[in-house]
Amino acid sequence: MITRGELKGQILRFLNKTSQYRGFYDDDKINDAIQEALDFVAVEMFQANEGWQLKLAEFDTTAGQVTFDIPFSASMIKEVRYLYGNFYGVMAYDDANSRSQVSIGSGERQFASSYRIVDNRMYFNPGLGEGGPKYLQIEYMTYPKTLMSDTDYLESHFDPCMTNFLKYRTATILSASLEKPIVPWAGIESSWYSKLVTVVNRRNMQSIPIRNFM
């Protein structure tokens, strides 16, 4: 893993190799450029899905509960599960267009089989029949965390080819700020981007066992 500070050092050493690209890069400008490059990679990972940026969270619920606040970091919900005895069953998404809303104080409850989303909240109609610790599981996609300081690490699933692409992409962004949009390392940046795309698209590739002919 690499910190933002370490990545910043690599970028500045690279830019200062030749007098052509030396310039005044204050911390804010470098940090913004790194974050822009990081966001570019994150979008590629997000669009590919295939296990990138997936998180699994478990939450406590109570019997009769009608609403649940969706985690702030959840950009896209992939699957919702609820505890049935000893296993988690998948809940179906129900837009509830033709169903009347059961009042919270009605006391009517059901096993958790469906939900809908309104105003960044999950709605269960009627309320949940049972509840307890870690009864609700949410599998969701999220963008990488924002790097707030030079000691923050890039998340562990960032492959080395992604880190190398970030280096060249950030250098290109900073060079453009000096009105030097055409850079001699464009081919290297493109090559690392191609490797990045290959890795992202093969995240879930399964190994093929070799047939035993013995």
Image: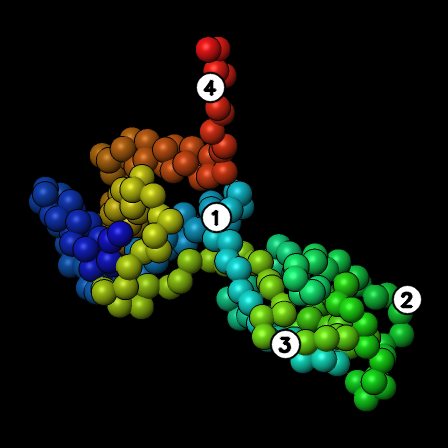
Image coordinates of residue 119 in percent, x first then y, are 67, 73
Give residue 98's mark: 2
Image coordinates of residue 13 in percent, x first then y, are 12, 48
- Depth check: give the residue in front, 154 or 13: 154
Reading the image, the residue beneath label 4 is 210
Q: Amino acid at mark 2?
A: Ser
**Nearer the N terminus, badge 1 or badge 4?**
1
**Nearer the N terminus, badge 3 or badge 2?**
2
Instruction: Kindly report the distance in space between the C-alpha atoms of the residues bearing marks 4 and 3.
Output: 46 Å
Instruction: Kindly report the distance in space between the C-alpha atoms of the residues bearing marks 1 and 4.
Output: 28 Å
Q: Residue furthest top?
A: 213
Instruction: Kindly report the distance in space between the C-alpha atoms of the residues bearing marks 1 and 2.
Output: 36 Å
Residue drawn where x is 51% and y is 46% of the image: 51
Instruction: Kindly report the distance in space between the C-alpha atoms of the residues bearing marks 3 and 1.
Output: 30 Å
Q: Amino acid at mark 1?
A: Trp
Reading the image, the residue beneath label 1 is 52
Instruction: Kindly report the distance in space between the C-alpha atoms of the residues bearing marks 2 and 4.
Output: 53 Å
Q: Residue furthest bottom?
A: 105
